[in-house]
Image (cartoon, rainbow, N blue to C red):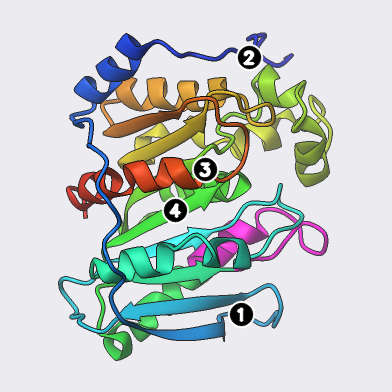
């Protein structure tokens, strides 16, 4: 079977965006100036596996915390499954933002395809989840209230774990920043990201089942409430990938918050995050 022939497109219709917020039960949060960061305890390069370079994480814990009211956000970097580091998220201010609001933050490295085969990075998310649970009493946090936040390929990993492996229900929500969601669509299979997925999973269509099985959009039964950020000018992960995920979530009755970053290409959008982070925080807290 050939990939679905859908021409990549950009949607900029304000009415559609507002309609999506209405359907998903989300209001349009106004911009709020950043608040001063609160103090936190931190540990760098905590080993959670046997690979001392790729299976490490940074841990940030708010000073005031308890085993009921302190949720966890796990940060998962991008890099097309072959590169990248947790360091790129250390400069985003998420550690201070979330800890200032009473969250624990775990920022992870994971095994990359240069050395390990997929689904090793998804397995690593599970290992970190186990580590969090094992150390929850020591850290004085709640290991059953977890949100995964990924960027690009990190979003695909976050969505895959949350939708297909979250058997204990501890992951309550996902924040997806411009992640690929349906590898079998032509915007991936015949698009600029196709070569990376080919390295990851083998050539399409000879390995079509593997491409299907690594696509979060095919796991709607297990989907959790999801925030989607998408740049309208993204030329690597085309906006249609986020459109399809949003449409599928809503069709299956799954809560979804959809945010277009107008004019943004592929990559982190600091001003966009500054504008929306308080709205995201409030929306995700509904489901924790």
Frontmost residue, 215 versus 229: 229
Residue at image mark 2 = 8
Residue at image mark 1 = 49
Q: Earlier in the sequence, mark 1 or mark 4?
A: 1
Q: Earlier in the sequence, mark 4 or mark 3?
A: 4
Q: Contact, CB < 8 Å: mark 4 with mark 2?
A: no
Residue at image mark 4 = 149
Quarter of the image for the C terminus: give it: bottom left
- Under circle 1, the secondary element is loop
Q: Report, in whole angstroms, how far the alpha carbon at label 4 lies from the one at label 3.
A: 14 Å
220 with respect to 138 (left or right):
right
Whether residue 161 appears in this view of the structure is no
Comparing labels 2 and 3, the label whose residue is closer to the camera: 3
Against 176, residue 256 (above or below) is: above
* Residue at x-position 63% and y-position 59%: 121
**The magenta stretch spans which residues?**
109-126
- Under circle 3, the secondary element is loop
């Amino acid at each position: 079977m050939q990939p679905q022939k859908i021409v990549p497109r950009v949607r900029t219709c304000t009415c559609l965006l507002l309609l999506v917020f209405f359907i998903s039960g989300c209001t349009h949060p106004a911009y709020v100036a950043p608040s001063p960061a609160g103090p936190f305890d931190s540990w760098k390069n905590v080993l959670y596996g046997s690979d001392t370079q790729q299976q490490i994480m940074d841990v940030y814990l708010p000073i005031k915390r308890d085993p009921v009211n302190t949720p966890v956000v796990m940060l998962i970097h991008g890099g097309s499954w072959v590169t990248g580091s947790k360091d790129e998220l250390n400069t985003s201010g998420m550690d201070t933002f979330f800890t200032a609001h009473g969250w624990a933050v775990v920022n992870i490295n994971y095994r990359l395809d240069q050395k390990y085969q997929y689904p090793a990075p998804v397995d690593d998310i599970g290992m970190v989840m186990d580590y969090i649970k094992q150390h929850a009493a020591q850290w004085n946090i709640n290991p059953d209230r977890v949100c995964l936040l990924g960027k690009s390929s990190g979003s695909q990993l976050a969505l895959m774990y949350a939708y297909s492996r979250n058997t204990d229900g501890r992951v309550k929500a996902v924040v997806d920043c411009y992640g690929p969601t349906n590898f079998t669509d032509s915007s991936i299979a015949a698009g600029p990201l196709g070569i990376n997925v080919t390295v990851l999973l083998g050539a399409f269509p000879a390995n079509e089942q593997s491409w299907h099985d690594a696509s979060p959009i095919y796991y709607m039964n297990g989907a959790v409430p999801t925030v989607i950020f998408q740049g309208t000018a993204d030329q690597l992960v085309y906006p249609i990938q986020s459109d399809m995920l949003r449409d599928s979530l809503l069709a299956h009755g799954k809560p979804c918050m959809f945010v277009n970053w107008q004019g943004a290409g592929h990559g982190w959008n600091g001003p966009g995050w500054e504008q929306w982070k308080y709205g995201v925080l409030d929306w995700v807290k509904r489901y924790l």
